[in-house]
Image: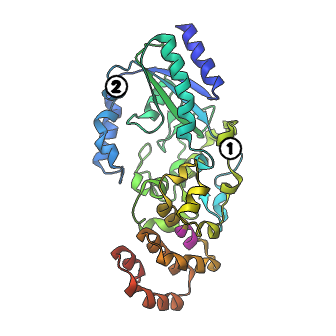
């Protein structure tokens, strides 16, 4: 058994993982209860799949009864940049650090598959690979395995890696000696709670996704509420504030994985250039990137909010061009951005010209005085 555990660590290191921990699987009534409460309070927002798969999410063995053990891996994606400093350049858009290069799902899954194939041969037991796409509660599992602990912002924190790492898991029918669980090291610190621009944390260790900028800019398919737009600033895909402010990041290091190193063209893309993206150009720019997943409509919606927050009147012509966009969520945010960038008399004149042409009720509401 000791030999197997050592081999697992060697395989993980060879694939570029920063750490691997092992946990024996068992039902966790407390975790299942927290999930149930989260969904009952509608804090999952429009992520209907969370409610639909609640029974399977409640326990790994509810999803796969034959699973005995989980191997949980950490993939460092830290970057040599200050995520909070990027928020000061209002003329550029901020993309979450994790999405500045290749889609981690494909990268991490490829590594895990190679290890899983070896593990299946080594033990003769069935294996399954998971990277954030199945109803598996990976963060609580990672804490039980000793990879880190769920901080007050509900994300995983590591004493060695800080906040900047992905989690992947291999479930196996084999029984492997488990590592010790990690304990909470947040103490009295509440920096992650206090920095949140939209107050998405009702209490420590609780998240209301409906108020979270990461949820709003990535998962939320519709119009973004007026109460959140100014607070979004120039964040156009995700939000790193609660991660970036964590004191444990003093131990974090930049990733050595080439496919996760930030692309220069995505570190601070200019809003004016992004506003010109049609569907083909959007797909080309974000080929292989997680940014492509929500689609061009949601992305341009976010860029328009950033434009409205920029105070840069030179963007008005490009924003105006989007008043004729086929997507209502784009037209609506073009209206809002113009209301912020144009002088009131000029915007009122434009409203009188355009409001009668608009057929979508949500967009028409944007034209109405606040």
Q: Residues within 10 Å of mark 1 (few under 14, many from 20)?
A: many
Q: Is the magenta stretch mostly helix, strand or loop?
A: helix
What residue do we see at 60% from left, 19% from top?
Answer: 9
Disc on res. 187: none
Q: Position of residue 50 (x, y in %)?
A: 34, 44
* Residue positioned 41% across, 66% down in the render: 225
Residue that mark 2 sits on: 64
Quarter of the image where the C terminus is located? bottom left
Q: In this view, does 41 lie to the left or right of 264?
A: left
Would you identify the image quadrant in which residue 366 lies?
Answer: bottom left
The answer to whether residue 126 shows anywhere in this view is: yes
Q: Does the magenta stretch include residue 249?
A: no
Picture layout, residue 121 above or below residue 87: above
Coloring scheme used: rainbow
Residue 38 visible, this angle: no
Q: Which badge, 1 or 2, is on the more N-terminal residue?
A: 2
Q: Which of 42 and 188 is in front in this view?
A: 42
Contact check, label 1 and label 2, Cβ < 8 Å: no
Q: Position of residue 27 (x, y in %)?
A: 33, 25
Q: In this view, does 154 lie to the left or right of 92?
A: left
Residue picked out by circle 1: 261
Task: Give residue 204's quadrant in the image.
Answer: top left
Range drawn in magenta: 304-309
Q: Quadrant of residue 314?
A: bottom right
Give the SS element for disc 2.
loop
Around disc 2, counting alpha carbons within 10 Å, would you say few (fewer than 14), some (14 to 19), or many (20 or more)?
some
**Residue 245's spot in the image, x, y percent?**
60, 48
Q: Distance from label 1 to label 2 (Cα)?
A: 35 Å
Relative to 345, does residue 324 appear above or below in the rendering?
above
Helix, strand or loop under label 1: loop
Residue depicted at 52% across the width and 39% down the height:
105
Q: Position of residue 315 (x, y in %)?
A: 61, 76
């Amino acid at each position: 058994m000791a030999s197997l555990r050592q081999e697992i660590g060697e395989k993980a290191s060879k694939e570029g993982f920063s750490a691997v921990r092992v946990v024996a699987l068992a039902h966790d009534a407390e975790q299942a209860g927290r999930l149930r409460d989260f969904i009952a309070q509608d804090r999952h927002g429009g992520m209907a799949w969370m409610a639909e798969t609640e029974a399977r999410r409640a326990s790994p063995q509810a999803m796969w009864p034959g699973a005995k053990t989980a191997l949980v891996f950490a993939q460092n994606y830290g970057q040599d940049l200050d995520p909070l400093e990027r928020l000061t350049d209002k003329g550029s858009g901020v993309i979450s650090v994790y999405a500045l290069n290749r889609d981690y799902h494909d990268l991490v899954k490829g590594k895990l598959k190679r290890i899983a194939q070896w593990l299946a041969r080594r033990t003769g037991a069935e294996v399954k690979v998971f990277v954030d796409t199945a109803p598996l509660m990976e963060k609580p599992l990672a804490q039980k395995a000793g990879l880190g602990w769920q901080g007050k912002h509900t994300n995983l924190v590591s004493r060695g890696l800080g906040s900047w790492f992905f989690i992947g898991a291999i479930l196996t029918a084999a029984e492997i000696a488990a590592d010790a669980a990690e304990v909470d090291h947040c103490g009295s610190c509440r920096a992650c709670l206090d920095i949140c621009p939209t107050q998405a944390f009702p209490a420590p260790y609780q998240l209301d996704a409906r108020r979270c900028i990461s949820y709003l800019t990535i998962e939320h398919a519709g119009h973004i509420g007026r109460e959140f737009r100014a607070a979004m600033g120039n964040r156009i895909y995700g939000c790193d504030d609660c991660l970036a402010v964590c004191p444990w990041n003093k131990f974090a290091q930049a990733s050595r994985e080439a496919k996760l190193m930030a692309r220069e063209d995505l570190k601070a893309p200019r809003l004016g250039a992004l506003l010109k993206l049609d569907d083909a150009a959007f797909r080309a720019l974000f080929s292989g990137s997680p940014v492509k997943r929500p689609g061009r409509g949601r992305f341009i919606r976010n860029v328009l909010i950033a434009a409205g927050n920029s105070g840069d009147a030179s963007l008005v012509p490009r924003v105006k061009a989007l008043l004729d966009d086929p997507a209502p969520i784009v037209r609506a945010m073009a209206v809002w951005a113009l209301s912020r960038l144009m002088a009131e008399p000029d915007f009122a004149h434009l409203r009188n010209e355009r409001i009668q042409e608009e057929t979508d009720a949500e967009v028409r509401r944007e034209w109405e005085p606040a």
